[in-house]
Image (cartoon, rainbow, N blue to C red):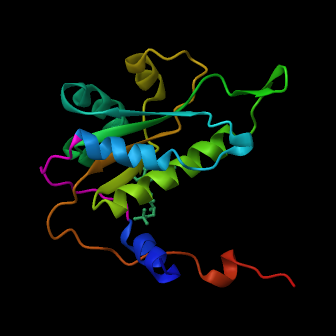
Amino acid sequence: MELSDIEKLYLQRQSCREFSDREVGEDLIGEICRIALLAPSARNAQPWQLIAVMGNQLPEFVKAVQPMGMNRFASDANALIVVAEDGGGVMQVGPVLRENPYVKNDLGILTAHLVLAAEAAGLGTCILGARDENRLRELLGFKKDRHIPHVVAVGYPKEGYEIREKKRKPLETTFTLLK
Ligand SMILES: Cc1cc2nc3c(=O)[nH]c(=O)nc-3n(C[C@H](O)[C@H](O)[C@H](O)COP(=O)(O)O)c2cc1C
């Protein structure tokens, strides 16, 4: 694999807000989750859980990512993948349980792996931070302290869905080389 292959993948990956009605197989959803879960985490604590929601379960979860009329396109997603903390934000350090200050970083890194794995599989994704977290916890039977930072909408992009040019801050404002 060349660096340019990775760049191509990154340029291709975009927030997909128009999904086709082509079904995504359960196996493929399982595969991209399995591969994403190879992501690194602080102390290898893997403080996460991915919950793939499909079929009859989907409509209620879709409503939970459409607060105040947002994310309407999520109604056309074939699956939602809930990215959740595994429980309470604590990690085992030797014999004791300590607060894990890295949970949020780890969940973000996992999500990055997930959307890129999905892209490599030809799927479109959109990370959804706008969500009713309480409702999601209720649907999943999670306790109140269990953080759900975002959900990922997944589906095949609508045919002809254009790849947008990336709008990013000028490199000189976001990258510095110190030597
Ligand atoms: C943590 C996070 C939350 C986001 N929440 C939403 C959301 O609720 N709805 C949405 O349409 N896009 C959401 N996005 C997508 C961003 O708007 C998008 O990544 C950004 O504009 C860059 O565009 P690109 O993903 O197409 O490169 C979210 C992205 C991240 C990383």
Residue 90: horizontal and vertical position, in percent?
Answer: 72, 26
Residue 45: horizontal and vertical position, in percent?
Answer: 68, 36
Using the rendered image of the protein, determine whether residue 65 is visible from the camera's viewpoint.
yes
Report whether 96 appears left or right of 46: right
In this view, which residue lies farthest toward the front?
1
Residue sitting at 41 percent across and 22 percent down?
135
Residue 167: horizontal and vertical position, in percent?
Answer: 46, 75
Secondary structure that dominates the magenta span: loop
Report whether 161 appears left or right of 114: left
Residue in front for this viewpoint, 134 or 141? 141
Residue sitting at 43 percent across and 75 percent down?
166
Give the residues drawn in magenta, as a range: 14-25
Using the rendered image of the protein, determine whether residue 70 is visible from the camera's viewpoint.
no
Q: Does the magenta stretch include residue 122?
A: no
Q: Is residue 174 above or below residue 34?
A: below
Q: Is residue 122 above or below residue 169?
A: above
Picture quarter containing residue 26?
top left
Q: Does the magenta stretch include residue 18?
A: yes
Residue sitting at 57 percent across and 48 percent down?
108
Residue 164: horizontal and vertical position, in percent?
Answer: 33, 74
Counting every numbered tag in the picture gives: 0
Residue sitting at 62 percent across and 82 percent down?
171
Quadrant observed for ligand 1 in the rendered image: bottom left
Q: In this view, does 169 lie above or below 153?
A: below
Picture quarter containing residue 61?
top left
Report whether 14 appears left or right of 157: right
Quarter of the picture holding the C terminus: bottom right
